[in-house]
Each structure stands twice: as structure tokens, then as C-alpha cells.
Image (cartoon, grey):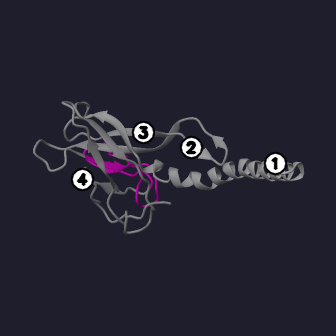
Amino acid sequence: MPNRRNFFRLGAVGLVNLFALALAVPGLKYLLDPLGKRSGSGDFRKLARLGQLKIGEPQAFAILAERRDAWVKYPTEPVGSVWLVRQPEGSPEPVLAFTAECPHLGCPVNLAPDRKTFLCPCHQAAFGFDGKKLNDVPPRGMDRLPVELSTEADPEVAVKFERFQPQTAEKKPLA
């Protein structure tokens, strides 16, 4: 049977360990938190229904996201945009998605005035609706993004948004 002195010693050691554990748990959560969020920026985002897209007519969609910087949480705001081009029936891919940033210098890519090609207004880089470059200004074609369609009758079009490094011939994701 423990005496009073051993009882208080064990109680003090137990309280100190409990206090140390209470301090360690938030620290471990802080260290391990980024591991769980690594895939969050590359999630598929639902942009439209397939029935809303006209065949062969590109439509631009803003990508909205909530950003965090250390402890600051910013409201949902546009972080980029995407061009969706619905393909004719029987095409291997029903919808093509491209980032709206020019691979030359990162300027926003728009429709050309004739609405038959994409055009970057900064240096006149031109692209077809298939994303291929039409002149020698850009180092590569427009950057394609993965597309997923839901299984409904009028499927939802979801895009995995990602940004890529400009001024390189190969497509390199930005970190």
C-alpha cells in the first residue's frame, strides 16, 4: 500500500504529463495539418451542365476559391478562369477544358474578335479551339485541364483547375 508521499509524487508526475500532453496535441495538429490539405487545390470543381454548353462555342468560367495565408482566411474570390469547349457528338471527349492563362507570359486568353480562335491580347498569341498554337509567339499550346462528367441525364461538367508555368515549352505545374 503506497504511503502519502508516494501518492502525491505519482499524482504530481501524472499532472505534469497530462499538462505536457495538452500542450503537445495542438503542436502535432499544426505540424500534420498541411499533409491533409495537400490535395485540396487540385479538386474537381463543378462549372456547368453539359446542356448549357453549345457545340463548338467556347465559354469562360471563373474558378472561385477560398484562400488561406497562415491564420488569415480570405473570402471566396476568383483565382483563375477556364475555357470549356463542347465537342460534337461522337468525339472521344465530350468537353475540352483549357486554362485561360497564356503559356507565353500568363496574360488572360480571350476569344478573338472573329470568335473563331483564342487570342492573347498581350503579344497576339493565337490558339485554335483545340488548344493548339496557331503562331510562333507562345512556347506551347493552351494548357488542357482534366474534365469529369457526372452520370446524370444532363451531366455536370467538373474541371480539375491547375496553373502552369509560363515561358516554357513543356507544361510544368506551379507549386
Query: What residue lies at 30% left-to-right and 55% top-to-bottom?
Result: 127
Secondary element under disc 1, as helix, strand or loop, is: helix
Query: Would you call the spot at circle 1 few (<14 residues within 10 Å), some (14-19), or many (20 or more)?
Result: few
Q: Position of residue 8 (x, y in %)?
A: 86, 49
Give whichever of discs 4 and 2 has the lower sequence position: 2
How far separated are the C-alphas under marks 4 and 2? Answer: 31 Å
What residue would you read off at disc 4? 130
Amino acid type shown at disc 4: Asp
The residue under label 2 is 67
For marks 2 and 1, give the one nearer the viewer: 1
> Which three-letter amino acid code belongs to the residue tagged 2?
Arg
Q: How far is disc 1 from disc 3 in space, using C-alphas? A: 60 Å
Separation of marks 3 and 2 at Cα, in angstroms: 15 Å
Q: Which mark is residue 11?
A: 1
Q: Is residue 16 above or below residue 173?
A: above
Bounds of the magenta span? 96-122
Given the current orientation, which residue lies at the most extreme front position?
A: 1
Q: Residues within 10 Å of mark 4 (few under 14, many from 20)?
A: some
